Image (cartoon, rainbow, N blue to C red):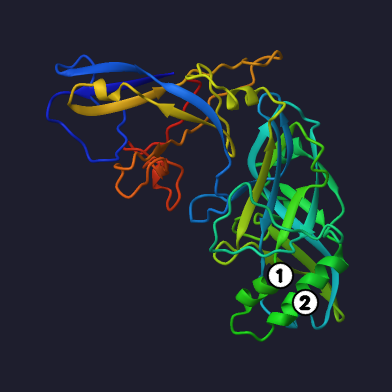
């Protein structure tokens, strides 16, 4: 890997923390402008500090759910935990109700990781009631988990064809046919939890807050967390109607009418917490050799969606560059598509890389020695603005 710096000795400058498109940065052959190639010291490490409870407008809440085996990176198991609130607060709507069924809805995000050419790959899911609470205002990392009631699960195991999710994504125009999980819940178990919460919160001036207090939430995970699949889909919690947002649809009718009615218990981004517990095992996978490397500098590194393989990069020659204005700096990676893989091309360049800085105790101000700090073009944590650069377009890394 090479670090390329294009610098100028003239008096031009730019606003700090702005990413400059190559069309507006100085050309290398301009008078007073030159480039320097600096070798990097690199090492692969495992990063499990990803925050999975991020929640703000403009960024979808996608959750990896299921199990997966990667031939290079090892195995992965993901479970989603989320709270719901009642669409029509109060237990009064069920006073003359005959409850027919309860269906858990978990919409497909449009993204699946793994062998997408496999049209027969399946995942088997099961829903559980959470025995521990979570909070809308708390941050949860990928390594965290919460207790579930495995003795009385909310559903039986349900097996789906993963390819069918992608095949129907963006093709169904009927809202009720939105692709995703549809899991029939055990009505007595679900009704016991939700009706208790409804009754406890009934009449409260803060019904939503109290309902969440008495109904901890729902967990959806693989029914067998030791059996690993070939693909793992991501599901989206937030949406704009009862069919494309996570929740439970309770179907009922009254004693005086057979007309079907629906009450929704849905994930409300303004009140409900969520988290994505992700565990990975790599001790017997090829990537472990990179994690355990004792070399001073590794010529091969690995990067994957976090939690997982990340890279430490040190550029020791920066201080050798003559004083001047740095107009552009680039890190160049070369993807080894077939590395450690006898089958054929598998590995692709990531759509976007998110760098973090390591504080040296002086810069940036307030950052202790050795601690990470967020760069301006890092994964958005408070707004979507980091997704754009100076020219207003989104930029992907393709291949190299």
Can you name the residue that lies furthest to the left here? 11
Q: Quadrant of residue 90?
A: bottom right
Number of numbered markers: 2
Say which residue label 1 marks.
215
Q: Residue at x 45, y 47 (%)?
A: 380
Mark linked to residue 196: 2
Q: Quadrant of residue 64?
A: top right
Q: Position of residue 362 (x, y in %)?
A: 29, 42
Q: Is residue 390 toward the left or the right of residue 178 in the image?
A: left
Question: Vertical placement of 373 versus 7: above or below?
Answer: below
Q: Residue at x 68, y 37 (%)?
A: 280
Q: Earlier in the sequence, mark 1 or mark 2?
A: 2
Q: CA distance from mark 1 to mark 2?
A: 8 Å
Q: Residue at x 43, y 53 (%)?
A: 382
Q: Position of residue 165 (x, y in %)?
A: 72, 41
Q: Position of residue 393 (x, y in %)?
A: 39, 36
Check if mark 1's residue and mark 2's residue have beta carbons within 8 Å. yes
**247 or 172, nearer to the observer:** 247
Q: Position of residue 224 (x, y in %)?
A: 83, 44
CA neighbours of label 1 inside 10 A, class few (<14), some (14 to 19), many (20+): many
Q: Is residue 392 toward the left or the right of residue 164 in the image?
A: left
Question: Vertical placement of 352 versus 132: above or below?
Answer: above
Pick the quarter of the image with the N terminus.
Answer: top left
Q: Quadrant of residue 162?
A: top right
Residue 356 visible in this rendered orientation of the protein? yes
CA neighbours of label 2 inside 10 A, class few (<14), some (14 to 19), many (20+): some
Mark linked to residue 111: none
Q: Residue at x 66, y 48 (%)?
A: 277
């Amino acid at each position: 890997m090479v670090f390329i710096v294009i610098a100028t000795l003239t008096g031009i400058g730019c606003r700090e923390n702005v990413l400059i498109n190559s069309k507006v940065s100085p050309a290398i052959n301009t008078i007073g402008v030159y480039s320097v190639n600096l070798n990097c010291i690199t090492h692969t490490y495992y990063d499990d500090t990803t925050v999975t409870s991020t929640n703000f407008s403009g960024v979808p809440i996608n959750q990896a759910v299921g199990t997966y085996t990667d031939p290079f990176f090892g195995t992965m198991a993901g479970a989603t935990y989320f709270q719901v609130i009642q669409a029509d607060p109060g237990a009064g709507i069920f006073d003359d109700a005959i409850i027919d069924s309860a269906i858990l809805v978990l919409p497909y995000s449009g993204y699946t990781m793994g062998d997408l050419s496999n049209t027969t790959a399946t995942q088997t899911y099961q829903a559980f009631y959470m025995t521990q609470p979570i909070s809308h205002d708390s941050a949860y990392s990928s390594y965290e988990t919460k207790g579930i009631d495995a003795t009385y699960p909310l559903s039986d195991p349900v097996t789906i064809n993963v390819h069918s999710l992608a095949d129907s994504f963006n093709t169904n125009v009927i809202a009720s046919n939105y692709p995703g999980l549809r899991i029939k819940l055990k009505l007595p178990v679900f009704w016991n939890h939700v009706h208790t919460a409804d009754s406890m919160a009934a009449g409260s001036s803060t019904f939503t807050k109290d309902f969440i207090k008495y109904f901890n939430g729902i967990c959806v995970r693989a029914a067998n967390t030791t059996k690993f699949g070939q693909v793992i889909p991501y599901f989206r919690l937030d949406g704009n109607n009862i069919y494309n947002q996570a929740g439970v649809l309770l179907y009922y009718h009254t004693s005086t009418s057979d007309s079907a009615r629906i009450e929704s218990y849905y994930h409300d981004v303004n009140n409900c917490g969520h988290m994505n517990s992700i565990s990975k095992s790599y001790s017997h996978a090829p990537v472990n050799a990179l994690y355990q490397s004792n070399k001073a500098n590794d010529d091969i590194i690995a990067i994957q969606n976090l939690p997982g393989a990340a890279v430490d990069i040190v550029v020791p020659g920066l201080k050798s560059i003559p004083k001047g204005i740095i107009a552009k700096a680039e890190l160049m990676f070369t993807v080894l598509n077939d590395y450690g893989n006898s089958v054929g091309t598998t590995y692709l360049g990531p759509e976007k890389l998110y760098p973090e800085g390591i504080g040296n105790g002086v810069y940036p101000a307030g950052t202790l020695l050795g601690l990470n700090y967020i760069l301006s073009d890092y994964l958005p944590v408070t707004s979507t603005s980091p997704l754009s650069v100076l020219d207003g377009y989104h930029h992907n890394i393709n291949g190299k």
